[in-house]
Amino acid sequence: MTLDILTALVVFAFVSSITPGPNNLMLMASGANFGFRQTVPHMLGIGIGFTFMVMLVGGGLVQVFDAYPISYTVLKVGSVLYLLYLAWKIANAAPINEGHGKGQPMTFLQAAGFQWVNPKAWAMALTAVSVYAPDTTLWAIFLVALVFGAVNLPSVSTWTILGQQMVRFLTNPARLTAFNWTMAALLVASLYPVLFP
């Protein structure tokens, strides 16, 4: 991989990781509701889970989907239903300091598993592998995954910090509820490209 292509890959990884999407919106909501420290497993699950996903997609998983086109439809329906469920959970989340609040932050395994039903993650992985590792050599796939792993964690941390900083303005229960419902609505809106390509 030439320096020009590597630079383009880093830029693509940064832009696709830092822009709004299901992961970042959920991290922002988690940062606001539970704080940075409680959200660290969620962030690590995204970073490591997505890096692993890129490796498997590059290693030939996409060929399974090509061989069985119905799997795309199953994945799409599953993704939409799961994102709607997560939006409902965000809308009804309560801050952790309420003792028996209605929500809790995502765990590492939940966040890593979520990458497999996240439409933006699929688009990112498929684009990254097809554009930056078209020969699908192990080294090229590893390099693409490594770049995403290095760029992803600082990018997603930004959204958690942003959510955590918003807590100052969300001290009123009504404002926190409005924030959670707004985050839930934005998460549902992020489904638009999936439902209407």
Image (cartoon, rainbow, N blue to C red):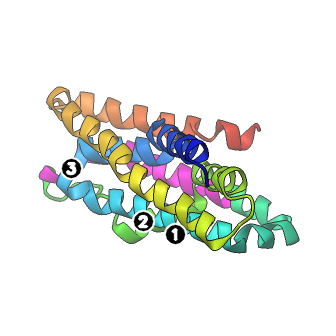
Secondary structure mainly formed by the magenta segment: helix
Residue 62, picture quadrant: bottom right
Residue 73 visible somewhere in the drawing: yes
Q: Secondary structure at mark 3?
A: helix
Mark 1 crowd level (few <14, some 14–19, many ≥20, 10 Å Cα): some
Location of residue 24 with respect to 96 vertically, above or below = above
Q: Secondary structure at mark 2?
A: helix
Q: Secondary structure at mark 1?
A: helix
Residue in the image at 40% along x and 55% along y: 150
Residue in the image at 48% along x and 55% along y: 147
Mark 2 crowd level (few <14, some 14–19, many ≥20, 10 Å Cα): many
Report the side of 122 relative to 11 (left or right): right
Q: CA distance from mark 1 to mark 3?
A: 24 Å
Location of residue 36 with respect to 56 vertically, above or below = above
Q: Quadrant of the C terminus?
A: top right
Tell me which segment is drawn in magenta. 78-97
The location of residue 1, given as percent across then percent down, is: 61, 55
Residue 158, picture quadrant: top left
Q: In this figure, which residue is indicated by the disc labeled 3?
A: 36
Q: Amino acid at mark 2?
A: Ile
Q: In this figure, which residue is indicated by the disc labeled 1?
A: 52
Q: In this figure, which residue is indicated by the disc labeled 2?
A: 48
Q: Amino acid at mark 1?
A: Phe
In the rendered structure, are the residues bearing label 2 and label 1 in contact, judged by CB atoms less than 8 Å apart? yes
Closer to the camera, 71 or 151? Answer: 151
Q: Nearer the viewer, mark 2 or mark 3?
A: 2
